[in-house]
Amino acid sequence: MTLARLVYYSGIFSGWAAFLGWLAGELFVLRGDAARGGWLGIALVGGLVGAAIGAGLTAASAMGERAWARMAGRMVLGAVGGGVGGLVGMLIGNAAYAGIGLPRFIGFMILGLAVGVVDGLADRSWRRVRNGVFGGLLGGMVGGLLFNPLVFLLASDSGIASRAAAFVILGLCLGALIGLTQVVLREAWLTVLDGYRTGRQLIISRPITVLGRADHLPLPFLGTANRELELEHCRIVRQRDGSFLLEDLQSRLGVFVNQQRVQGSRILASGDVIKLGANHVRFQESRRRSGAVAANSAMGVASTANHKSPPPPPPPPRRPTVAQATDTIPVPPPATTITPPPNLLPQHSPSEQRWPSSTPSGRPPLPGTPLGGDGTRR
């Protein structure tokens, strides 16, 4: 069913259930006279009303699944929890009112708390338990505040009509506010856009939500058009960081997200359209949930950046090669060679050195030869 219908049916079912519970209490316990029953009689009536409201509320939440056997089991669990809560709540509420003058609606809040917890336990979801606690306390307080004024305004000789109206209003407030709390505090949900029973919606409150054509699933796809689907076709798994992972359970037809086949698994984003067989289902997340996931992702990236390993130490200096050493070590300039003037260089080897050609033969003069005026020997 749609989320709006969930709130509506939760209120209607709980209101009628409260009426049936009150009727049983009037017929078998009070017998038309509330004073005759005393505290114990009032507590028993509260237990019957609580059991009826618990059964009606769980039936309303399970009605959209069309799993009748499962619905019967949940109704029994809701009746037990609601009956205990109603019995204890009426005892505590009347004792507190008569003893220390506390408001009587405290007992109705305890009844609502028990009913809300049982609705979440029947679904095996602690998030539904949390939301049911909030809705039950709020519904019990509102219904309890209206209880005494209605009894006073509709007072009659026997008081039967006023008690009936007060208990019905109590059931309506409990059911509607518990259902409304589940819708308002939802984090992710599915909407069937096309296929089997278009328009259905499912709040994802469990750690694992399986989709397929099996009757026991919370959002089954039945009919002849889905006979090729697997009994458990795919599943949506809630991750530790709050994101949702879609996994294909090795189906023959496969699973598609935004017209792309999923290979193994894929993280879903708000607005993604899941296709399994002839059915199209939209996955959506609340804005606060999307913001929280984005913030967690950003914090994870920042944490990873802040915890990076320190950079490695610089490598030790390398010994220079011969070529590098030659380039870096200064080399003295080569020694310059002094070249004597050309007239001082010998023109011949010592063995070939000649005297000045003063004689015709070029030989040296013999000893004893007189010198001429020019200093030569004659």
Image: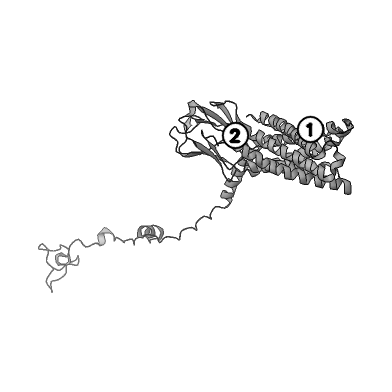
Task: Identify the residue at the far left of this view.
Answer: 361
How many C-alpha atoms fall within 10 Å of the one at disc 2: few (<14), some, or many (≥20)?
some
Regarding residue 180, the answer to whether it shows in the image is: yes
Label 1 residue SS: helix
Viewed as shown, does residue 49 lie left or right of 325? right
Is any atom of residue 291 visible in this view?
A: no
**Label 1 packing within 10 angstroms: few (<14), some (14-19), many (20+):** many
Camera-nearest residue between 187 and 70: 70
Q: Which residue, given by chain and number where applicable, does mark 2 sit on?
A: 68
Report whether 114 appears left or right of 67.
right
Q: Dot 1 corresponds to which residue?
A: 169
Along the viewing direction, whichever of 62 and 154 lies nearer the viewer: 154
Q: Nearer the viewer, residue 338 or 87?
A: 87
Side (left or right) of 41 relative to 292: right
Circle nearer the viewer, 2 or 1: 2
Question: Mark on residue 29?
Answer: none
Does residue 126 lie above or below 151 as drawn? below
Q: Earlier in the sequence, mark 2 or mark 1?
A: 2
Q: Amino acid at mark 2?
A: Trp
Looking at numbered disc 1 in the image, what kind of residue is underneath it? Ile
**Distance CA(mark 2)–CA(mark 1):** 28 Å
Corner quadrant of residue 31:
top right
Residue 126, given in percent of the width and then of the height, sits at 65, 44
Image position, residue 71 (x, y; %): 62, 36
Q: Quadrant of the N terminus?
A: top right
- For label 2, the SS is helix
User: Which quadrant holds residue 167?
Assistant: top right
Left or right: 202, with 109 as reference point: left
| Screen quadrant of the C terminus | bottom left
